[in-house]
Amino acid sequence: MVDRRAAGLPLEYVLGWAGFCGLRIAMDPGVFIPRRRTEFLVRQAAALARETASPAHQAASPADQAAALARPPAVVVDLCCGSGAVGAALLAALDRVELYAVDIDPAAVRCARRNVAAAGGQVYEGDLYRPLPASLRGRVDILAVNAPYVPTEEVGLLPPEARVHEPRVALDGGADGLDVVRRVIEAAPQWLAAGASLLVETSERQAPQTAETVARYGLVPRVASSDELNAFVVIGERPARPRGPG
Ligand SMILES: C[S@@+](CC[C@H](N)C(=O)[O-])C[C@H]1O[C@@H](n2cnc3c(N)ncnc32)[C@H](O)[C@@H]1O
């Protein structure tokens, strides 16, 4: 194991797991290794999901508890799921949740099934929303996305652990880094329930443009950030009613 690490193989591939949100996420070589900063995306998504469906154990009275149990579970989608780390962490953090995860890379899908399927989530292979069941349209409460967002020209500047060992499809977001993110945002309103939220991890530099794109597609944008994790998440809420002019 020391030899493999000394030869440059990322530690998580050597060990076969990555630490994320207090969980051990099973890792296969060639699958994106979850980053510490993405724990901030999970925290933001979990907080919003709790607002959507308050868990029964937090109910003040038996009547509130019965009402909480009668409410349908929050519908959560982990798009561009990689190893499924975000979905697995949300399954662990939330009381009642219906979890769907998607990735285009078969190796990621296999890995995500190890991490998510055992906890009750479902993993699909394909391009963004395409493989999701049509019945989810307009029903998603939380759409949590860590898509590739490195500009093409900057992929070569990443540390070798990423540049050499992680797949290009997990890193390269096109000329300005936002090619996949734009496609995610454009279709999000068709999948989100009224009052639900899209959460997209981004960088400090890309956050303003990502927020503008979110607004262009009718979602109400805000940027959440964590100094501790150097993390930026653009959140777009689908208004309960369509926004009128002005
Ligand atoms: C930056 S990695 C993030 C993985 C995971 N969300 C995480 O935080 O650990 C981006 C992932 O998006 C996937 N991906 C890229 N383009 C995609 C597309 N068009 N549809 C679905 N998944 C895609 C890649 O295969 C990769 O696993």
Image (spheres, rainbow, N blue to C red):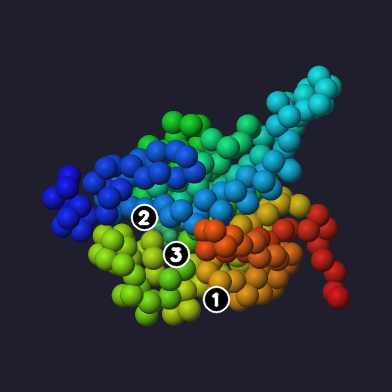
Pair 3/1: label in front: 1
Mark 3 vs ligand 1: CB below 8 Å: yes
Q: Name the residue under label 2.
A: 32
Question: Which secondary structure, mark 2?
Answer: loop
Q: In this view, does 135 lie above or below 5?
A: above
Q: Mark 3 points at which residue?
A: 148
Q: How far from the left and from the top, in percent, is residue 82? A: 41, 52
Pair 1/2: label in front: 1
Amino acid type, callout 2: Phe
Q: In the shown orientation, is residue 125 left or right of residue 6?
A: right
Q: Which residue is drawn at 52% across and 69% down?
A: 203
Classify mark 1: residues with Cα within 10 Å, few (<14), some (14-19) or many (20+).
Answer: few
Split into 4 quadrants, where in the image is the C terminus? bottom right
Q: How far apart are marks 3 and 1 (CA)?
A: 15 Å
N-terminal-most mark, 1 or 2: 2
- Number of callouts: 3
Q: How far from the left and from the top, in percent, is residue 71? A: 74, 32
Front-most of residues 141 and 204: 204
Q: How far from the left and from the top, in percent, is residue 224? A: 65, 61
